[in-house]
């Protein structure tokens, strides 16, 4: 399975592309801006995952410095 994330300038373009995707036997759905941001954040979190646990105090100290 391959996944493509595509941003288009108009709703009409999205509808045309979705029709093509369905005709080719694929599936797709429109994402809201919030859903897109959540997905992007999830990908970044997975890429940065170390497996180490961090205390609340360490997190709060980093946030205070930012």
Image (cartoon, helix red, strand yellow):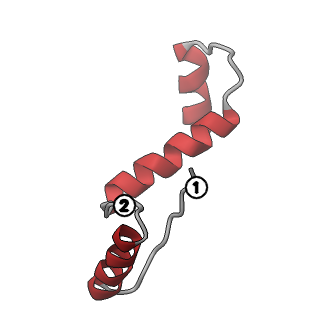
**Residue 49 on image: x %, y %:** 66, 28
Separation of disc 1 and disc 2 at Cα? 12 Å
Q: Which residue is mark 1?
A: 2
- The tag earlier along the polypeptide, 1 or 2, is 1
For residue 33, which quarter of the picture?
bottom left
Secondary structure found at label 1: loop
Q: Residue at x 46, y 48 (%)?
A: 39
Contact check, label 1 and label 2, Cβ < 8 Å:
no
Residue 42 seen from this side: yes
Numbered badge on residue 59: none
| 57 sits to left or right of 15 | right
Q: Is residue 28 left or right of residue 6?
A: left
Total numbered labels placed on residues in the image:
2
Determine which residue is flagged by label 2. 28
Task: Give the residue drawn at x 61%, y 35%.
Answer: 46
Residue closest to the eye, 22 or 10: 22
Q: In this image, 54 relative to 33: left or right? A: right
Q: Is residue 66 visible?
A: no
Q: Position of residue 27 (x, y in %)?
A: 37, 59
Q: Is residue 17 above or below residue 36?
A: below
User: Circle 2 — which element?
Assistant: loop
To which quarter of the image does residue 57 belong?
A: top right
Residue placed most toward the observer, 10 or 52: 10
On the rendered image, what quadrant is the C terminus found in?
top right
Q: Specify few, some or many for label 2: CA neighbours under 10 Å numbering under 14, 14-19, or 20 or more.
A: few
Residue occupying the point 51% across, 51% down: 40
Q: Position of residue 3 (x, y in %)?
A: 54, 57
């Amino acid at each position: 399975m391959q996944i493509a994330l595509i941003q288009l300038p108009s709703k009409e373009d999205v509808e045309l592309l979705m029709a093509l995707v369905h005709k080719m036997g694929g599936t797709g759905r429109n994402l809201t801006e919030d859903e897109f941001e959540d997905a992007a954040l999830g990908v970044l979190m997975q890429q940065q995952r170390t497996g180490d646990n961090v205390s609340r105090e360490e997190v709060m100290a980093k946030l205070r410095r930012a």
